[in-house]
Each structure stands twice: as structure tokens, then as C-alpha cells.
Image (cartoon, rainbow, N blue to C red):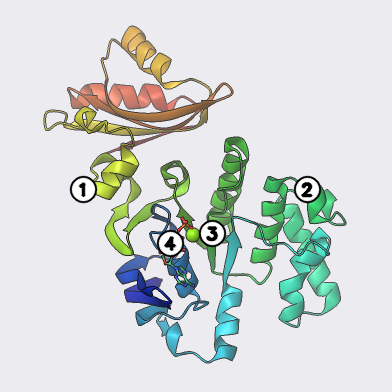
Amino acid sequence: MIEIKNLSKTFETSSGPVEALKNVSISINNGDIFGIIGMSGAGKSTLVRTINMLERPSDGNVVIDGVDIGSLSDKELRKIRRTTTMIFQGFNLLMQRNCLKNVCFPLELAGTPKVEARKRALELLDLVGLKDKAKVYPAQLSGGQQQRVAIARALATNPKVLLCDEATSALDPNTTNSILELIRDINKRLGITVIIITHQMSVVESVCNRVAILENGSVVEQGDVEEIFSRPQSKAAKTLVFPEGQEEGGISDKQKYVVRIVFNGAVAANQPMVATLALEKNIKANICWASTKSIGDKAYGSMILGFATKEEMRIAEDYLSATQDVIINEI
Ligand SMILES: Nc1ncnc2c1ncn2[C@@H]1O[C@H](COP(=O)(O)OP(=O)(O)OP(=O)(O)O)[C@@H](O)[C@H]1O
Ligand SMILES: [Mg+2]
């Protein structure tokens, strides 16, 4: 578990102090895919850098599995950074080393014997789907492939936590989805806790289970993604969830039976799905809110549907859950 407790960070600059973080408290459970979202300048990168003490906080603590890491020596911190690794927007690969050697790098630093490091690096390149690129240099790879190498490198030291600072911001939507898919797979298969820093709500909605919203250095809201998506409280959350000011379409008190549908590359788009529900099952769903994108013939994003009765909601859930790549949660 990662407990960020009353964390503050003030930078002293020539034009005066800049309060990048103000009394931030966040709890992240083991196994979470935790999103930290906010506009540019909100303090996201500063926060993520304080989680592994690349940046020393001005005040407050970061406690990882019961250890207050601010109190550790530099040597102990280097060890922590092997278990709490990072990937970045710009990939940060070593351009003069091939993929295999990039992945071997943290193992060399940790003193792993060469043969063992090479074996592990090849396994990891296989895990990220780049087995055949071991001898290729980063410049010869696409952005998505470079991020895969960076992920393999971040996994080399068997971390417990993976910190992702805008890891998909430089990628197109399809590549973004494939990288998020890989991150989800890593979280599930290896049990690694993931912290995703992003300014895109779509990233949070497609992979995160919990989220904190950062505004001007403060956390204005945190909790389960579904809860915040269906009932955003703060102004910042409302702006992120309803970017075009669509609040009026939100959930009214009358709609007691509400489901959230996440499209994860489902072939059917939202409108026909709701239309066929009406035609085939004679159920009228009320679209309370929708934010979906079609990429090719596939739909991504989410939609909140309201029903008049519980019975209707159940039938609709059965009907919609038969569609591939659609996830349904009651809210
Ligand atoms: N080393 C530094 N010295 C002075 N001020 C800094 C430093 N690093 C960050 N800041 C300031 O702290 C605030 C938060 O910056 P930060 O980089 O954490 O924001 P961010 O949310 O990551 O933004 P973006 O989405 O643009 O990456 C900004 O006002 C920034 O100018
Ligand atoms: Mg940043």
C-alpha cells in the first residue's frame, strides 16, 4: 500500500515560491490501477516524482508498505527505485543501445550477472510483444514499440509498483489502447500496482479502478472511478467528466436503476445498441451521459444508461453483456 500523507512541495524560484503540491493525501492499495488526473501545471509530475523521492517533499510523508521512504538513506532509496519504477511520455530509452541492452541496463546497475540479465531481458521483450526486436535500436521503432521497450525495462527489476507519467500522451488512439491493454495485463498477471498520471479522462475510464483529481496542487476529489464518473462532485471533476458542459443530462433522482457501460473496442457503436435494445426487447433506456469514440469500426469510452424498473435493467444487462468487449457495472 502507498500512503501519501499531507504532502506539500514548494519550489523556490527567482520570481518567488511556487506551491506545486498542497497538503495532498492519497491512499493507493496494492493491485490498484490508480489514476491521477489534472490539467497542465496541476502538479502531477511533481507528485509522481515525490512518490519515489526523485523530488523531496517540503512537508508530509510517503509510506510504502509501512516504510516512510523519506527517512531512507540514498542507498536504501536506490533499492526502492528498483521496486517502484517509472515510464514517461518521451520513453527515455538509451538511443545508442539496442532494445535488449536497454532492458538489461537496470539489471546491470543492480549487479545481475550478464547471462542472467540477458535471459530476463529476452523474456520481458517477449512479454511486451517485441521478441524479434532485441537487436534493433530505438530509433528504428515506432512510438508504441519504444514505449513497450520502456515497459520491459521498467519491469526488469521485478517492481511492485509501476509509475506512468503521461505514458500514452505521445501516442495515437489505437497505440494508446494497445499500451493500456499491456498495462492492464501486467497489473493482472504480475500483480503490479500501477499509478497512471494523465490529463486524459479516457485513459482513466478505460483502465483505472480508482482516481484522484488534482487541481492547482490540491486533490479535489478521489475515489472509485465509477462513482466519480457517475456523480462528480467537484467543479474540476465535472469539467473532466462532462467536458462540453453536459451536466443537465446527468442522473436524476427518478432514475434509480442505472448502469455504466464501458466500450473497450466493442464492434457495435452505442446508438445502434440502445436502438436494438428497444426494438428487440422493447426496453427504452435513457442515455444519461455518453462519451464514446469510434476508432475504425470499434467503440471506446463509456455510457451511462438509466431504466425505469429493476426488471428492465436486468434484461438490458443480460442483453448488452452478450456483446464482446462491453463491460457493465451497476451504479
Ligand atoms: N523544478 C521546478 N522548479 C520550479 N517550479 C517547478 C518545478 N517543477 C515544477 N514546477 C512548477 O510546479 C507546478 C506543477 O508542475 P508539474 O510539472 O508537476 O505539473 P503537471 O501537472 O505535471 O503538468 P503537465 O501536465 O504540463 O505535465 C507548475 O506550476 C510548475 O511550473
Ligand atoms: Mg507533467
Residue where numbered disc 2 is placed: 141
N-term-proximal mark, 3 vs 4: 4
N-term-proximal mark, 1 vs 4: 4
- Which quadrant of the rendered structure holds the N terminus? bottom left
Relative to residue 237, is residue 62 drawn left or right? right
- Which quadrant of the rendered structure holds the C terminus? top left
As measured in the structure, the alpha-carbon distance from the residue carrying label 3 to the one carrying label 1 is 26 Å
Q: Residue at x 38, y 21 (%)?
A: 319
As measured in the structure, the alpha-carbon distance from the residue carrying label 1 to the one carrying label 2 is 43 Å
The image's mark for residue 44 is 4
Q: Secondary structure at mark 4?
A: helix
Label 4 with label 2: CB-CB less than 8 Å: no
Q: Residue at x 58, y 76 (%)?
A: 81
Could you say where residue 304 lies in the image, as x and y percent from the top left? 30, 31
Which class describes the residues within 10 Å of circle 1: few (<14), some (14-19), or many (20+)?
A: few
Q: Residue at x 77, y 77 (%)?
A: 108
Which amino acid type is marked by label 1?
Gln
Viewer-side residue, 36 vs 169: 169
Relative to residue 182, is residue 21 drawn left or right? left
Which class describes the residues within 10 Å of circle 3: few (<14), some (14-19), or many (20+)?
A: many
Q: Taking the image as drawn, is residue 238 in sight?
A: yes
Residue where numbered disc 1 is placed: 233
Residue where numbered disc 3 is placed: 164
N-term-proximal mark, 3 vs 2: 2
Which class describes the residues within 10 Å of circle 4: few (<14), some (14-19), or many (20+)?
A: many
Q: Secondary structure at mark 3?
A: strand
As measured in the structure, the alpha-carbon distance from the residue carrying label 3 to the one carrying label 4 is 11 Å
Asked if residue 98 is positioned above or below residue 293 in the image, the reply reads below
Which class describes the residues within 10 Å of circle 2: few (<14), some (14-19), or many (20+)?
A: some
Asked if residue 92 is positioned above or below residue 278 in the image, the reply reads below
Which amino acid type is marked by label 2?
Leu
Could you say where residue 76 lies in the image, as x and y percent from the top left? 56, 88
